[in-house]
Amino acid sequence: MTANHKIISDWLKQQQISEIECLVPDMTGNARGKFIPAHQFISHADTRLPESILVQTVTGEYSDEHWDFVEPTDTDMLLRPDASTMRLVPWAREPTAQIIHDCYTQAGELHPLASRTVLRKVLAAYEEAGLKPVIAPEMEFYLVARNEDADYELVPPVGRSGRRETARLSYSIDAVAEFEDFVEDMYDYADAQELDVDTLIHENGAAQMEINFRHGDPLSLADQVFVFKRTVRETAHKYNMYATFMAKPMKNEPGSAMHIHQSLLDASGNNVFVDANGEHSAALLSYIAGLQRYTPELISLYAPNVNSYRRLAPDISAPINLNWGLDNRTCAFRVPHSELAATRVENRFPGADANPYLAIAASLASGLLGMQEKLTPSAPHQGTANEDSVEVARTLEEGLRNLGSTPAVRELFGDLFLRAYTAVKLDEFEEFNRVISSWEREHLLLQV
């Protein structure tokens, strides 16, 4: 028994766990895996899953190029549990644990198609550079009434007042209190899973909430966002509602984002974004320049779904170009006013629908490449950035065109992963494109 397996086994016994969810984040950031009785897990630590699940579309289909990415025998990959991800499943009827696993090939190497592997590779590049990234995600989501027929538009749920929200209620305390029971249970579930959630606010949309996470290690926080999204959905089901992390679930409401605050520490624990004079350092400026340079290439990792690009549109509180600014929320890359030790940059591109492992990897990779190449950013933007022209892709197909176009990105993410991701997402785009919308029938049927 390895030391890692002994730690897990001892914890399972202490918690009197009867069943384990062995979890793997797939390409969409959703949970795949197996339910295994605890006694079987303890006695047989060798867990396997078909590697094909890593390159399945959001609709459960496979791209035409599928067998170019995985073995034609549809072989298994090996799963190894990460003891740092052990958590209870607070909504389960029986004492149940959840453990996130890393995926390995039969040769014993981290699987190149696994989301966790991609983030691990980027973090290894930082370690080699003698730097430690620190991040803090902000997760937005909507509560919506149950919607059992996909042909009907979503509407806000009824709150304790018996009414639905209709007004813009940003930061409203009373609007959050409309769903007090949901909020209390969500926090209880988060505490039971030791998630580092911090403040909750009511966002701009009807029944739209935002949860901030405390800053910490990128891999740990990617795991926590992965778990948190499951938690919020489960809590909403308890109250006969849906919770959705779609980037733009309702046409008249703003989109939902996963803003990522990020800073870097050197070997002594000092924030490298500040120089000896207490000013913004050259490292910070190059990091921002890297975000500006590589976001067009990596936009599909921030906006991974056909719906994602409905959020990245003018005048709906989301970035549309590559400007950066000082405490300017209209910019894609914002440097908030803060104490020197907390100097950081916020990437406002990622949607709430993004795979957290891939979005965090893309953001950190962009900044690292910017520093390595000593890039120079534009001048900080003054005024409203949304009044400038659109500089990013407006469709998933457009966003995928340049993915992996530079050797540096291919080196960090792996050529196989980038080709597989592109194939999977293009398949989703083409499937979506075959659907004829009600707008087309209304305006084109008899008038063109």
Image (cartoon, grey):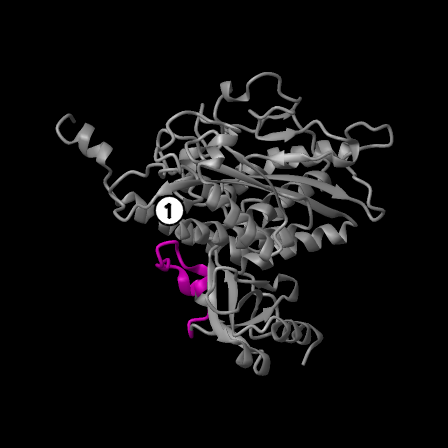
Q: Residue flagged by tag 1: what amino acid is it?
A: Met
Q: Where residue 135 sits in the image (x, y, percent)?
A: 66, 44
Q: Position of residue 127 (x, y in %)?
A: 75, 53
Residue 425 or residue 158, whichever sits in front: 158
In the displayed structure, 57 sits above or below 146; it is: below
Up/down of 420 relative to 308, above or below = below
**Seen from this angle, which residue lies furthest bottom?**
43
Quadrant of the image containing the C terminus: top left
**Disc 1 target residue:** 241
Q: Residue at x 49, y 46 (%)?
A: 354
Specify whether residue 137 is painted magenta.
Answer: no
Direction from residue 265 to residue 152 in the image, left or right: left
- Name the residue at 52% across, 46% down: 184
Instruction: Mark yes or no: residue 401 visible.
Output: no
Residue 134 sits in quarter:
top right
Compared to 409, does 26 lie above or below? below
For the record, the magenta segment spans 53-73
Left or right of 156 in this view: 422: right
Most distant residue in the left direction: 446
